Image (cartoon, rainbow, N blue to C red):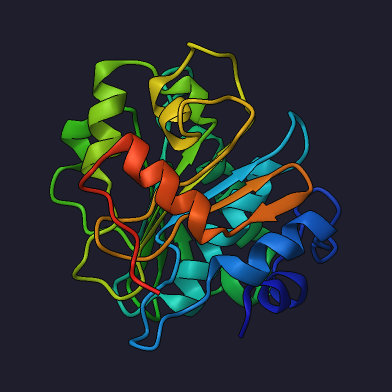
Amino acid sequence: MDAATFIETTLVNPETGALFVLTDAEREFLAHAFELTPDGRLRYPELVFSAIKKSGKTAFAAMLVIYVIVVLGERYAEAYCCANDFEQSQGRVFTAAARIVEASPLLSLDATITANKITFGSTGSTITAIASDYAGAAGANPTITVFDELWGYTSERAHRLWDEMIPPPTRRIACRLTVTYAGYEGESELLEARQGGRADRPVALPRRRHAHGLAHHADRTVANRRMARADARAASPQCLPAPD
């Protein structure tokens, strides 16, 4: 099942009690985000969704986490919702995911929800909240990791957490999702690196010797190989897109 269909037929908005309805921008993003390569891997292991404040980014990120864990992930899939330096350990994405799972009848009967973990009994898959502390992420094997409001990851430990949560090459389905607004120039080195050093040009870098990046800014989707190549060369000579 594709992501848009799953979200609009399965996930219930806890605030309204009705199924979610995606925006055109979210549909456009999803049309590319979970494309697979011929060998069954995600074409875009780095996903970036950027939009203005109060536009529903956090809830959208929670929907994507649930989709990956419930539909795409294999047994014992692992999702991690990372809190930034200005949040408590649960983070907003985990809180949103827990509320959506609890409100969605098709998921709630299979899920056990605690203060920092959602466990799906039928598969053993989990969604875990972790603080902005790389030591707590050591040994993780994430199917998907979410960084909410990347401008808020400013400390050294946050940078190390980002490095620790790189999509593992051992999983066919593995990605790192960033949802954020633009922030301010000079505020976050991590966010500016994703944008190629320019606040007005959002770009996600491809995984080393793997597929291309995907960036979404406001109401347009960018899945441009030339942009990915240019940014990869500028940012890191070791970060190479896949050949055509």
Q: Is residue 181 above or below residue 24?
A: above
Which residue is painted at 20% across and 47% down in the image? 238
- For the point 30% across and 65% down, the residue is 210
Could you say which quadrant of the image residue 242 lies in?
Answer: bottom left
How many discs mark residues in the rendered view? Answer: 0
Q: Nearer the viewer, residue 35 or 149?
A: 35
Residue 88 visible here = yes
Of residues 36 and 57, the one drawn nearer to the viewer in this rendering: 36
Query: Would residue 219 be found to the left or right of residue 63 on screen?
Result: right
Vertically, is 213 above or below 50?
A: below
Residue sitting at x 43%, y 42%: 115
Residue 236 at x, y = what percent? 27, 39
- Residue 7 or residue 189, whichever sits in front: 189
Residue 50 appears at what percent x and percent y?
64, 40
Does residue 114 appear anywhere in the picture? no
Assign the N terminus to one quadrant of the image: bottom right
x then y, percent, for residue 136: 20, 36
Look at 34% across and 60% down and name the residue there. 241
Place residue 158 in its image quadrant.
top left
Figure check: 40 above or below 179: below
Q: Quick check: 91 left or right of 200?
A: left
Viewport quadrant of the C terminus: bottom left
Q: Residue 63: percent from the left, percent from the top?
A: 62, 59
